[in-house]
Image: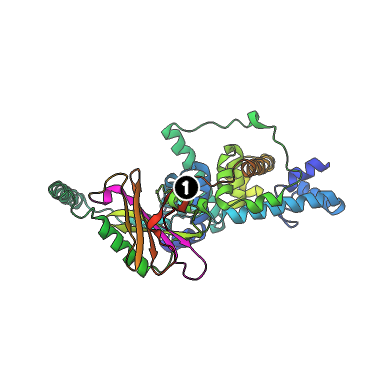
Amino acid sequence: MNIDEAKFILSAIRNEEENLSDPQVFEALKMVKNNESLKQWWTEVREFDTAVSSQLKKVPVPPGLKNAILTGVKVSTKPKPNRWFMIASVAAAACLMIGIVAWQIMNPFSQNSDSIATFRNDMIQQLKELKTLDHKSDDPNSVSLFFKSQGLEITIPGEVDDGKLAGCKIMEWKGHRVSLLCYRRDGESKADIHMFTVDASAIQHWNDGEVKRTPEGDWKSTTWNSGDKIHLVVMKGNSKKNPRNLIPLG
Amino acid sequence: MKMKPALIATLVDEHYENLYRFALSLTRNEEEAADLTQQTYLYLAAKGGQIRDLAKAKSWLFTTLRREFYSMRKETGRFTAIDEKEHLEVEAPDNVEMEVLKQASEAMIMEGLSEIREVFRVPLALFYFEDFSYQEIAAILKVPSGTVMSRLYRGRAELRNWLILRLETDTTPRNIVPLRWASGE
């Protein structure tokens, strides 16, 4: 066995104890003991593997996936309901759907949307009650991947002034999903910055290109839209800067 | 033959995360990966009773997911056959550059894994996600052990080269716009 052949075999194993019963592995490991450069090469390969493996195991998994799997398994293993019950259920569901659609046609702005002021107030209330983030990371790529795993395409500012990305959360509002990005700012009188994004269809009477600022009160905010998304940046008052002029330059 | 729900719950706890990541490396699509993972456990619920040796449940899950992936690809017409012979010339990693890896995030490594050729990606994902040995990978892929060794060797080299190139050419995360304070304060 030459060095290249030994490398070929060693790159498939992780430690000295693995697969000793394989004569080729045994011989390659014997060569490692007697060859310093081969030993060094194998150490580096294993370091690479350990680093890659540990990084890959950090790739976020959709938070609801485990429940979905367990629920799916539970449903699939339940005995099937009888035919008449199924027909009755489908008929009832169809009636309900027709009712909902008719109601929605008559009340276009009913429960699925509201004014920007309500959105702002509701989001500030959510912030006050916020305990944890769904995904903590200062890496925009990681946060982006998390949102993608949840079916959301969100534009993520890597930093907001001197605020560093701290993590994100996904919320529900009026049947719409709202993404929240949190930016931490260190130092005295520097409040954290929170950026909410929601589909424009969730907000009533919003004009494209509009920028709304609320510089007064305990919570200062700026709202604007980019395409079919509306962004709301909120920062607690009592700080030197406020987000009234905070809009994207890109 | 169905498997007991308590046992399924244990196997979900132990493997669903890495099973999802493996699926993600195959599909490059979060929704498809989640579907594949769910589908695999549904098969486990329906047919898992056939697994005699529970130590083999992990291999069974990954084998089933991979089989489902190819089946899905065939159905949707997006399956591309793998011709390993086309891709034999790959530079071997003589000096693995750890400094490169220190800068690479999990998202970047995942992207790199998704970018390398499927013939190398599948064994490498099994090797990294669930710490399968090359012999277990050979059993899952139904190929000789030597073939797995070859694919791991070349796959690692491809991944490393991809990471180096990525870090050299593009360090800016995608989908980013800068936000700054506008003047007036």
Q: Magenta stretch: give its range.
A: A181-204
Q: Nearer the viewer, residue A124 or A32?
A: A124
Query: Which quadrant would residue A77 be assigned to in this image?
Result: bottom left
Crowd class of label 1 (few under 14; some 14 to 19; many from 20; radius 10 Å): some
Judge whether B115 appears above or below B45 on screen: above
Judge whether B137 appears above or below B72 on screen: below
Image coords of residue A129 (percent x, y): 36, 69
Image coords of residue A133 (percent x, y): 44, 63
B59 to the left or right of A218? right
| Residue drawn where x is 36% and y is 69% of the image | A128
| Residue drawn where x is 73% and y is 43% of the image | B93
User: What chain is tagged by disc 1?
Assistant: B
Quadrant position of the C terminus of chain A in the picture = top left
Residue sticking out furthest to the front? B184
Color style of the picture: rainbow
Q: How many marks?
A: 1
Residue A68 shows up from this direction? no
Q: Which residue is mark 1?
A: B177
Question: Three-letter amino acid code at disc 1?
Answer: Val
Residue sticking out furthest to the right? A34
Q: Secondary structure at mark 1?
A: loop
Image coords of residue B151 (percent x, y): 66, 40
Q: Nearer the viewer, residue B11 or B164?
A: B164
| Residue drawn where x is 26% and y is 59% of the image | A117
Residue A168 shows up from this direction? yes
Indicate whether residue B111 is drawn in magenta.
no
Quadrant position of the N terminus of chain A in the picture = top right
B103 to the left or right of B13? right
Residue sticking out furthest to the top? B86
Q: Nearer the viewer, residue B65 or B21?
A: B21
